[in-house]
Amino acid sequence: MKRMERDIVIVGAGPGGTACAAYMKRLGLEPLLIDKEFFPREKTCGDCQSGVTTELLEELGWLEGLREISYENHGIVMTSPDYAKIVVEAPFKGRRYDTPRRIFDHYCVKRAVAEGVEFRENVWVYDVIWEDGKVCGVKAKMDGEYIEIRAKMVIGADGSHSIIAKKIGMFPDSDSDVAVVGRCFYEDVDMEPYNEIHFDKDVLPGYVWLFPEKDKLCNVGLGFNRDLYTEDGKTLEEYLDQWIESSPYGECLRGKKRVGEFRGWRIPSGSQAMDNVVSGCILIGDAGSMVMPLTGEGIGPAMLTGKIAAYVTKEAFDKNDFSLEVLLNYTRQRDDIYGPKYAQIKSLENAFASPEAVNKFVHDIIDKPEVKEAFTKQWYFEAYEKEEAKKK
């Protein structure tokens, strides 16, 4: 079997992997970034870049380029099963964008490569290399040839069905912490610049989203936590079709052309995340179950955990020590940032469990300024945290 040797291999070139690679390069490290696909490639997602994502893009110097290819949204519109509607404005403009992942991910890859990151496409990883109780690389098929890529560090950034996570025994799959979701696109849709979230009696305990993108394209999808997804014979696509035809908020899609196929995927939330490290390996993003509960936001956690992984990897190289003891610094830093957030947002799920509960929740936001203020700070917590940090 052919053999390659690199200091670091990052498996997966989504936003988490590319951010990790870029931060590593800036720290003087030499990562190899690989992906099983050719770019640009399709990636099923809600397509929103906000909060931590835009903060890190700005830090990397990539935000202005994103603005040129994206559609800015100004916050969210949320509706209840009784069709009450509330607009929750984002506290700061210029920080929330909607971009198809086919475009956004390719943009991030190109920016990482421009910084000198070595990138290989069409590399399908199927196993990790274990030696003396630590990960020492990956086994892959590259351009039709089976190879070993030996490395002192492996970063698993290969998404919600992560091979790396499965091979190191850190692939939790709890029904209460994994969502099943699907999405498609509609064209020529007239919308205000807000991401719409619709809680409907026929869709609960999930919700439908409509996220506007450039040139009147609209990302349309829905999702359920797997333990709440009732098996009544309907597919996710049939639930969505029913909502479009029955809800007044689906009217903007009636008669419009659906673009591409309806595609489903798995969203593993951070409330089930494990340590995500073993000797010689770190998991980031969806590969490490880092998605925010309820909101489904995954790009920001992927990029931030990628940054943390880069700095911890730098520490490991400085010490020439890739042991679990050193890499657990990643877990500690991750938990300090995300542990309280996961618990807080997870606690909101009960408010969206039944039509009566959602109606009360949305009406409380409408009728009680203090509830709206509290919800706004929870939903846009990254923006408020950044402003608080500036004051200190």
Image (cartoon, rainbow, N blue to C red):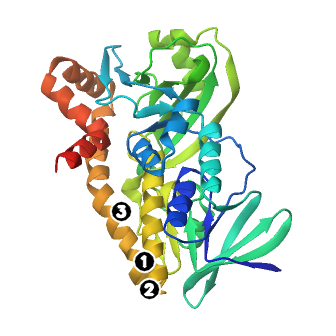
- State the residue at coordinates (55%, 65%): 25
Q: Residues within 10 Å of mark 2 (few under 14, many from 20)?
A: few
- Residue 137 visible from this viewpoint: yes
Residue 388, by quadrant, is top left
Q: Nearer the viewer, mark 3 or mark 1?
A: 1
Q: Position of residue 85 (x, y in %)?
A: 32, 15
Give the spatial CA distance, label 2 vs label 1.
6 Å
| 180 w.r.t. 309: above or below | above
Residue that mark 2 sits on: 319
Q: Position of residue 333 (x, y in %)?
A: 33, 66
Which of the numbered marks, if any, corresponds to residue 103? none
Give the spatial CA distance, label 3 vs label 1.
16 Å
Tell me the SS state at disc 2: helix
Q: Nearer the viewer, mark 3 or mark 2?
A: 2
Give the spatial CA distance, label 3 vs label 2.
21 Å
Is disc 2 in contact with disc 1, using a CB cutoff of under 8 Å?
yes
Tell me the SS state at disc 1: helix
Q: Residues within 10 Å of mark 3 (few under 14, many from 20)?
A: many
Residue that mark 3 sits on: 334
First along the sequence among labels 3 and 1:
1
- State the residue at coordinates (59%, 9%): 254
Residue that mark 1 sits on: 315
Tell me which amino acid carries mark 3.
Arg
Quick one: 306 or 57, which is closer to the camera? Answer: 57
Tell me which amino acid carries mark 2.
Lys
